[in-house]
């Protein structure tokens, strides 16, 4: 299914400068470094919770609230900032968002206690979704014809690459110099990204007539909601498994604690692989890629239930779980295609949906474990969420076909 012509964003063409291939790559690299900073800052805290808890005088579960606070900041900040900054020039807004993220991390490094750290992590999460949504729009606008998804994938490569490179470095700094050093490291990367964005990203004006009210128009489009639903539900399966991967592999597969970083690195490598492959497939056939990745997700997550009993099989499976991020660039492009002239809000909401998937998957996985179904039950929870995402996907297809038939009848 292709988006109707009216849903395809054409209004950016007049505001998009023509760039050479080398200039395009420099711009995408700058945007990707910003994504690398955000990805490192988002995930590094998960490996430093004991150190954080000890320093702020909280239990480890209480210290885990800083993860939820950041995710809540993403969910709230993405739509609010996207709407309020609709008329800003693109480069200026990207620099401002990255400055906000850098300041949040430097401030987090100085937080004196539990409450202040949670408030600061919430504030630090606010620019996350808007940055990635806007970076995706800019990269897609600068991309050569037929390579929009690959351009978005290159920006997202910064986020996925952070799990493979940035997080281990920041975690090492945190373990040797204290968890606050990890946030300082993230803030420094964000400052580097600001300089690169200011230097290498073209100074693009917002689409003609851009305004907060026009951006809010995205919320009136059914296909926008369907796409967000696919992300929030179908992608939740990955988090159902990954949120509990460490205790599952240690308790069920007998993985020694020293092997956990290796398995986490495999997950990061899977994310990078999935991001690159998924973006290429999305450029060839967008909707088939979304449906195919959802089906692949259901199979891979169901396999985890059986693979988790063997260290080698479990390690391979965790790599495959990482590849499920292949759906990210495809859903980002789909939102651009169905949002009409409300591009910024729709693109930013994609990351709110992914953070909702994080919360939903982790919560349902915990419910299954708490109900006595065992550590490996998260695989079935993940598979069911993927199947539910396929249900939303099928509903979206049926709705689009019905709308196309209605338009054809009216035209006759």
Image (cartoon, rainbow, N blue to C red):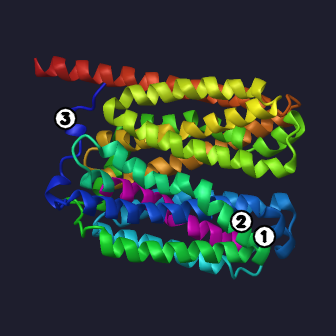
Secondary element at tag 2: helix
**Residue occupying the point 26% across, 51% down:** 143
Q: In which quarter of the image is residue 119?
A: bottom right
Residue that badge 3 annotates: 5
Please say if 323 is above or below 144: above
What's the residue at 65%, 26% (across, down)?
Answer: 383
Q: How crowded is mark 3: few (under 14 residues within 10 Å), some or many (20 or more)?
A: few
Which of 290/116 is in front? 290
| Disc 1 target residue | 175
Residue name at image x 82 percent, y 39 percent: 249
Q: Earlier in the sequence, mark 2 or mark 3?
A: 3
State whether the magenta stretch is mostly helix, strand or loop: helix
Q: Which of 309 and 385 is in front in this view?
A: 309
- What is the number of the mark on residue 171? 2
- Residue 274: image x %, image y %? 51, 39
Q: Is mark 1 on a helix, strand or loop?
A: helix
Marks 3 and 1, Cα distance to the nearest angstrom? Answer: 53 Å
Horizontal side of residue 379 vs 135, given as left or right: right
Q: Does the magenta stretch include residue 23?
A: no
- Specify the segment rendered in magenta: 116-138
Of badges 2 and 3, nearer the viewer stands 2
């Amino acid at each position: 299914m292709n988006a109707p012509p009216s849903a395809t964003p054409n209004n950016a063409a007049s505001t998009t400068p023509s760039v050479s291939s080398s200039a395009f790559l420099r711009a995408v690299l700058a945007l990707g470094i910003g994504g690398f900073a955000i990805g490192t800052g988002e995930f590094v805290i998960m490996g430093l919770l004991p150190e954080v808890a000890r320093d702020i005088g909280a239990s480890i579960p209480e210290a885990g609230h800083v993860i939820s606070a950041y995710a809540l900041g993403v969910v709230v900040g993405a739509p609010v900032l996207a709407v309020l900054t609709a008329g800003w020039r693109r480069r200026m807004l990207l620099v401002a968002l990255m400055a906000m993220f850098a300041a949040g991390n430097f401030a987090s490094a100085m937080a004196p206690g539990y409450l202040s750290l949670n408030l600061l992590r919430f504030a630090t999460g606010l620019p996350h979704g808007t940055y990635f949504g806007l970076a995706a729009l800019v990269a897609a606008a600068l991309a050569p014809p037929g390579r929009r998804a690959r351009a978005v994938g290159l920006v997202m490569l910064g986020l996925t690459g952070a799990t493979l490179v940035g997080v281990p470095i920041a975690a090492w700094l945190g373990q040797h110099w204290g968890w606050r050093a990890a946030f300082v490291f993230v803030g420094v990367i964000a400052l580097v990204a600001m300089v690169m964005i200011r230097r290498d990203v073209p100074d693009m004006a917002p689409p003609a007539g851009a305004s907060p009210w026009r951006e809010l128009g995205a919320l009136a489009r059914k296909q926008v909601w369907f796409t967000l639903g696919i992300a929030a539900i179908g992608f939740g399966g990955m988090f159902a498994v990954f949120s509990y991967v460490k205790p599952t592999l240690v308790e069920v597969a007998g993985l020694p604690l020293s092997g956990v970083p290796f398995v986490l690195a495999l997950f990061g490598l899977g994310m990078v692989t999935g991001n690159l492959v998924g973006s290429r497939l999305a450029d060839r056939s967008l909707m088939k890629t979304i449906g195919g990745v959802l089906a692949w997700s259901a199979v891979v997550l169901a396999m985890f239930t059986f693979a988790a009993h063997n260290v080698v099989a479990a390690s391979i499976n965790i790599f495959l779980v990482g590849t499920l991020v292949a759906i990210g660039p495809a859903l980002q492009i789909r939102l651009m295609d169905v949002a009409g002239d409300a591009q910024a809000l729709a693109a930013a909401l994609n990351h709110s949906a992914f953070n909702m998937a994080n919360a939903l998957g982790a919560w349902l996985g915990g419910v299954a474990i708490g109900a006595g179904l065992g550590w490996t039950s998260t695989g079935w929870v993940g598979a069911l969420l993927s199947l539910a995402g396929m249900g939303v996907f099928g509903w979206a297809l049926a709705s689009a076909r019905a709308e196309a038939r209605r338009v054809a009848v009216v035209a006759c």
